Image (cartoon, rainbow, N blue to C red):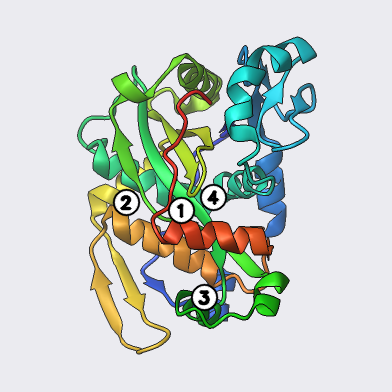
Amino acid sequence: MAAPEQEEQRHIPIITAVHPENKAYFKEIAAPKKVIREGRSKIAVSCSQCMKPSSNGAELLKCSKCKIAWYCSRECQKAQWPTHKKVCKEASSSMPKFLGSFIANPLLNHTLQVPFVLAFDLRKNPILDQPLIARCDVQIEPSDMTYIMSLAFGRMSPAELAKGTEGMLQVKTFIPLDAEKAIDITRMEVWKNTKYPNKERGFAGNPTVLVDFHMKGTKQTITYGLVIEDSAIERVKAGAGFAMQSAIFGGQTEVPLTTQACLDFINMHIRADKKNQLRLRTHMTKEDVDNYRNAVSGDDEQPDKSE
């Protein structure tokens, strides 16, 4: 469980057009690799058992199997094992790095903040003294649409399935949760570890929220803290939506600023990254493809709130 450090208010330009094949446009708005690396190194990590914070995880031990849980000592690791073992075997070792790159990306971070402003009406009522939380289902899915279609219609040979394919992170849902039911002691500590350090950096007047990233097809959830910046609130006040342009059919459609429009933008932006500049692509093994197929077919697991 982690929280990114935020040193100053970022001014994110309002994006008014998205085209998955527009290389020049992607290059214009995409975060450079250096920015993502620097942002990821500033994400605060806490012990999964006692919640002792570490600025970059250097002082903590990482679970060697799932690469998700962090511990400040062997004692904490042993103490949490009865709980952690339920989800450790299901964790994707690449997912923590993906989510770190996602949160460290200024444009994607900003676009995820907007649904919080919409869902909790933070434009009119910036809630500062209590945590808000939402769940985002995330998934690694094939980046090649023809591969997805062949998989859906059962046209993949065993040899083709064994090779795997290139995959990319996609955010499938944004679901506001009841804080009284969803926030346990651990999540409250994540909220505090996000709120108070950022308060000292000049974000005292900005809401602090939590996002549970749930990996579809597993019970695994990773919680991050976010500070809702002024740019996200101003974006909602302006009411500026998106001008979505289809790469298949052409033409442009004006789309209002909604949660779904934000998710569509996030996913299209990731899909447009053919060279993995955003660090959100990886090779999917046959097992990964099988997990994706099970998740798509509805054979999904609910997140385990004990993590």
CB-based contact (under 8 Å), mark 3 and mark 4: no
Choose the circle earlier in sequence order: 2 or 4.
Answer: 4
Choose the circle earlier in sequence order: 3 or 1.
Answer: 1
Q: CA distance from mark 3 to mark 4?
A: 34 Å
SS of the residue under disc 1: loop
Q: Which mark is residue 12?
A: 1
Q: Amino acid at mark 1?
A: Ile
Q: Which residue is mark 2?
A: 235
Q: Amino acid at mark 4?
A: Pro
**Viewer-side label of 2, 3:** 3
Q: CA distance from mark 2 to mark 3?
A: 39 Å
The residue closer to the viewer here, 150 or 179, is 150
Choose the circle earlier in sequence order: 2 or 1.
Answer: 1
Q: CA distance from mark 4 to mark 1?
A: 8 Å
Q: Which residue is mark 4?
A: 106
Q: Amino acid at mark 2?
A: Arg
